[in-house]
Image: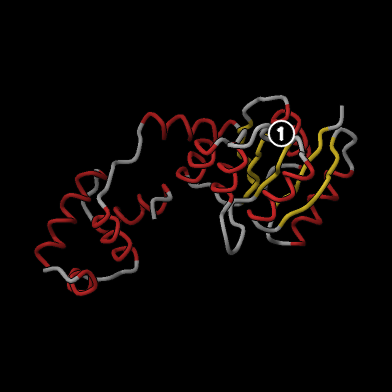
Amino acid sequence: MTTTVLLVDDHPVVRSGLRAVLDSADSVQVVGEAATGEETLALVARLKPDVVLCDLRLGDGIDGIDTTAALHALDPAPAVLILTTFDRDAEILGAIEAGAAGYLLKEVAPEVIVDGIQRAAAGETVLTPDLTSRMLKSMRSPLPKFTDREIEVLRLLATGSTNKEIARALFVTEATVKSHLVHIFRKLGVDSRSRAIRVVQDTGLI
């Protein structure tokens, strides 16, 4: 049985490459292409593909995770397989929580993509062993919860801003910034600004 696929990527060259790969597989048929999340939703309603092969970054408009959530809410819903270059834990978990059937990186071999599409269509979860291990680890050790103000401080911290610059940007005192940093460091289990930045960047928090 042939699995029908809609390709979703905002780069035409990438879509052409993927189409070439999938067109060479007898078990898969590409029925359409989309460059944005909005275009994807419209085409799925018309083409009703078995699987949507979707990137995370789709330029302007809704991203791959929001597109996945919208597709997952349809009845019937296509299986969504994320194919991207982004491999941060927060993005992997975000996609799976939005309803994606799987998550693959663009560096995988063509046959892995074809096999992933077929497995997604069959209702299986598609993750490479290393991503499965990372996702399970992240689920066992979830990220701490930060307040909106702490997130603002983290984002400014990641730009290299000093306490004085952060205080000025947020219209608070330096003492308040220091208090936020104490709470942030404790939640992350770190003891320096550089380690805090590294942790939140690696996990995709900012």
Farthest residue to the left: give it.
Answer: 175
In this rendering, would 191 be left or right of 36? left
Q: Height in image: 168 above or below 33?
A: below
Q: What's under tag 1, amino acid-wise?
A: Gly
Q: Height in image: 73 above or below 151?
A: above
Report the quarter where the N terminus lies: top right
Q: Which residue is mark 1?
A: 116
Report which quarter residue 80 is drawn in: top right
Callout 1 environment at 10 Å: few (<14), some (14 to 19), or many (20+)? many
Report which quarter residue 77 is drawn in: top right
Q: Which residue is located at x 31 percent, y 69 percent? A: 160
Q: Which residue is located at x 52 percent, y 39 percent? A: 98
Q: Position of residue 187 (x, y in %)?
A: 23, 44
Q: How many marks?
A: 1
Q: Which residue is located at x 46 percent, y 29 percent? A: 136
Secondary structure of the residue carrying tag 1 is: helix
Q: Which residue is located at x 71 percent, y 34 percent? A: 116
Q: Position of residue 189 (x, y in %)?
A: 24, 43
Report the quarter where the C terminus lies: bottom left
